Amino acid sequence: MSNSHVTGKQCPTLLFSEPPPDTKEEPAMGLILDSYLVDLLVIVATLFFFLYRYFTSTFDYFKVRGIPYLEPTPFFGNIKDLILMRISGAEQSQNLYRDLKQHRFGGVFHSRRPGLMVRDPELLKLFLQKDFNHFQDRGMMVADIKKNPIAAHLFNLEGATWRSPKSRVSPVSVLVLQGPRGVAPGATWRSLRSRVSPVSVFMLQGPRGVAPGATWRNLRVKLNPTFTPGRMKMMFQLLNECAKELQAVLKQPADDGQIPPLGVVVFQVLEMRDVFAQYTTDVIGTCVFGLQFNSMKDPDSEFRRMGKKVFQSSFKASLRRFLVVGLPGVAKLFNLKFASDDVSNFFLKSVSEPQPPKSPASSDSTRSTPFVFAPTGADLTDKVLAAQAFVFFLAGFETSSTAMSFCMYELALNQDIQDRLRVEVDDALQAHGDVMTYEAVQDMHYLDRIISETLRKYPPAPNLYRKCTVPYPIPGTSITLEQGTRVLIPAYAIHHDPEFYPEPEKFDPERFTEENKASRPSCTYLPFGEGPRICIGDPTSHLEPPDVPLFAGVRFGLLQVKVGLATLVRHYRFTACERTADPLVLDPRSYVTAAKGGSMSQHVAESDSQGLNITIFQILCRNIWMR
């Protein structure tokens, strides 16, 4: 048989290989459970649960105490529209005020923070005047002046202690000055009210846990007041120079130094609120700091830029302010500040560097020096002056410029009121030699009414705050407010209540005749507060109780407003145009009452038949976000 011939079946070749790998994937393992996705969902749900519990943990505060309240919404409380920046703080509090119409007072929630809104003027009178010892703090976030010296501002401080009654006191000491243990709440700042500069008194608070009834008369502090009537008169010439500069600034873009041909109209648009802010900034710089800021000539001056920075209405700034006011615990946790570090450093620098030479146009008798209320024998450090400078700067320029803007807007819409005011200004000046003098301004009573009505319709602070410092039984009820309870006073809502002001949206200066003022309940006009803790800038300080010393400085803000308005109304007419917003839309991002987009002035320059230059101003408001 041949080897090449094979019969039968051929044996297959045997192949050896490793078995194929198992292609089945094992499930991914998470950190906690079987999946990272599930882990994430669990973490998010847990975080949401704890946040929900945190933001709703106080929602039974009023219920367990038997106080009527508005049902809150998780995370938002009763101010959802305000947090989402749909409406302004003034409008939000007005809505809450209306919802509590059937009650003298009621509970509301700023996010998770409970507060008692008081509607009844009789209760307000007790809280702000008769029983103010129980509500002498404002309940704002306590500032750490060691980390941020100028944070001791606007309602901020409470609970600090004056360690030695015999120590020498400087203005910064006044900021933190409190009674020693055993001093009655509020006794410290009460004892100083007649001797302390308005700025210092503005920020004093009572200590926590002090025993009422103890003596405080051993607190001997001698401080010089910032303003006296004589100093006010001396400063008037400087203030009047600023008003003339304001007149020139408004006239220049209207005519550009040239008289237009007959019938030719020239338009120029300005941001009126910004212009007035430049004016008030220069007034404060000249009359208080002894410096020329030149904000009207140079709108980008450093002081003006810093003022804008503090009052900016960006989303970030609005959120920071909301946390400081509504959630002070969160604000402290993240070390949120009212003013940024560059603002703090600027004011520190502004008071530490030598002052420039005085203006030749100003005499030594009228030129102020920075913070002339320095106490005798006290050492003034840079931080001391910076804190005082910052407070006075804020208190002086923003509210005054906003009030001027609103006033001009209303005068533009009400020509009859503007004409009557112009006649009064002319008559007052003619009676004083056709010169703007301190005495002439004091004779402009109709102007006083116009400003009062402006502040009624547009109060700078839409809400006032107090904190119960001693347990307080509410008269006529079985309810006792606990120490630490926050009290909300809706000034804007009260000013727009038809019960106190019929046709509240109507601009009517006659509401403030002596007869009409006497016919209204007390504590229904609160543009700057009421009682012994009234704001230092209150131009209605005649409403104070007779036992409260009256500082001339409280009228300084009113004086600069009156001089500025009288100067402009005498020389120009303000009219509305097709772009004028009526009614105004309030800015939801601003923590003071301000128009959304600001006030605009449209200058119209034209010539009459004799070729004389006539300047007419048209007031309008932009309905836009950008400034």
Image: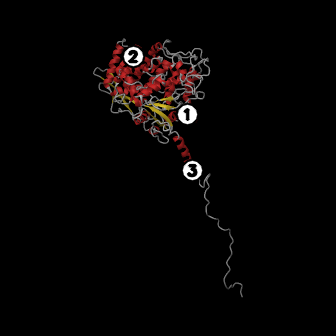
Query: Viewer-proximal residue, 402 or 304?
Result: 402
Please say if the residues under marks 1 and 2 sit with CB atoms less than 8 Å apart: no
Query: Tell me, what colour scheme is on the image?
Result: secondary structure
Q: Residue at point 52% right, 21% down? A: 201
The residue type indicated by label 2 comes to: Val
Image disc number at residue 353: none
Comparing marks 3 and 2, which lies closer to the viewer?
3
Picture coordinates of residue 303, whole percent (x, y)? 50, 25
Q: Residues within 10 Å of mark 2 (few under 14, many from 20)?
A: some
Q: Earlier in the sequence, mark 1 or mark 3?
A: 3
Residue placed under numbered mark 3 in the picture: 42
Picture coordinates of residue 66, whole percent (x, y)? 47, 36
Image disc number at residue 336: 1
Could you tell me how far apart the alpha carbons at marks 1 and 3 are, in whole angstroms? 31 Å
> Secondary structure under badge 1?
loop
Q: Quadrant of the N terminus?
A: bottom right
Q: Residues within 10 Å of mark 3 (few under 14, many from 20)?
A: some
Q: Is residue 243 left or right of residue 213?
A: left
Q: Is residue 302 visible?
A: no
Residue placed under numbered mark 2 in the picture: 441
Comparing marks 1 and 3, which lies closer to the viewer?
3
Picture coordinates of residue 232, whole percent (x, y)? 46, 15
Q: Earlier in the sequence, mark 3 or mark 2?
A: 3
The residue type indicated by label 3 comes to: Val
Q: Is residue 409 visible?
A: yes
Q: Quadrant of residue 258?
A: top left
Picture coordinates of residue 78, whole percent (x, y)? 46, 38
